[in-house]
Image (cartoon, grey):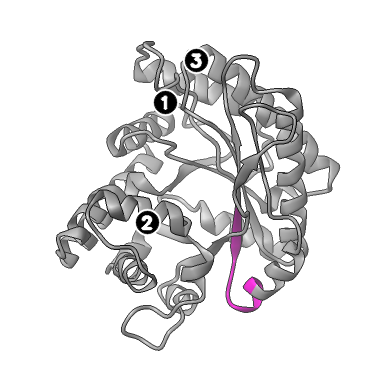
Amino acid sequence: MKNLHLIAKKMVSSGKGILAADESTPTCTKRFEGVGIESSEKSRNGYRSTLLSTEGLEKYISGVILYDETFHQNLQGTDKTIPNYLKQKGILTGIKVDTGAKKMANHDNEKITEGLDGLRERLQVYKMAGADFAKWRAVINIGKDIPSRGCIYANAHALARYASLCQENDIVPVVEPEVLMDGEHHIEQCLITTEETLKIVFQELRCLNVDLKGIILKPNMVLPGKKSNQKCDQDQIIKLTFEALINNVPDEVPGIAFLSGGQTSDDAAKRLNLLNKTYNEKPWNLTFSYGRALQKDALIKFAEKKFKETQKNLLHRAHMNHLASLGEM
């Protein structure tokens, strides 16, 4: 497990975070269509190759989460596989291994993440091809009479089974239980749900003998639902977010890399900065694992075929979150 501990620490090393570039083909296609780009294997490879070849990205990014398609591609215009290219830049390679959140039987409006079948064999292939870490996302909705305990327990158990299989194959698992921002709930309900979810997730991880020193937690921040009219100031958001973490995340976990989860790029960075500035005495590093919050501005420039500006915008966002992870923004 020693190697897992070293990789996990490197993933959340001071001033660095994770770039989530693991959008599935349907999700990536939707985002491309939103800015007028035709989605194809070539265009997706071109976009991700442009992002990953940004000069100086390794100053702020410790690792990149890839989708299966990207993982097996070469960096566009080269004969190097993307995992090998990242390794040469000193960036760790991650891979999304779940197969998506599907409708949960006998649980209206709830989902269960699938992908455990054949996971051991897939992880072995990814490891041989250069994977250092993996990611599995569970989604928890808040609404009328949900989430149910059945949904939380089922997703937590799946996260634990995934994490144990990762560690068996010398891959660090990123454990992502996301309480969604969708809905009309108030921030207090998000706090209750986030705390219950984290508590159960760590119960299941321990039950399956997962080494907590060799994982990274990727949680949501505690926020009101997008459709609620509740106005919360930043101080309240970071106070409740930290409360959920300090009450439920064991000290052994080396780092917490927040997901952006529908927040604006600016809000995600500001809140991370405030968390680190306000709570400098904490057992784990607090950093970022953002997708849209790092890529949104870059994608617009890529659609305009302004590739240097694509990279400039990505680097700017990475630098801002680098500062936020230090509480120096």
Residue at the bottom extreme, as displayed: 79
Q: Quadrant of the N terminus?
A: bottom right
Report if residue 20 is visible in the image: no
Q: Which mark is residue 278?
A: 1
Which secondary structure, mark 3? loop
Residue depicted at x 71% and y 23%: 148
117 and 3: which is toward the camera:
117
- Position of residue 316 in the picture relative to residue 13 (left or right): left
**Label 2, label 3: how far apart the Cα atoms are:** 30 Å
Q: Which mark is residue 29?
A: 2
Which numbered disc, 3 or 1, marks the residue that appears first in the sequence?
Answer: 3
Vertical placement of residue 237 versus 166, above or below: above
41 and 290: which is toward the camera:
41
Q: Are marks 3 and 1 in contact (CB under 8 Å)?
A: no
**x and y percentages locating residue 154 in the rendered image:** 76, 36
Q: Amino acid at mark 2?
A: Thr
- Position of residue 153 in the picture relative to residue 229 (left or right): right
Q: Which residues are magenta?
A: 126-135
199 and 121: which is toward the camera:
121
Asked whether 134 falls inside the magenta stretch, the response is yes
Vertical placement of residue 34 versus 284, above or below: below
Residue depicted at x 45% and y 22%: 223
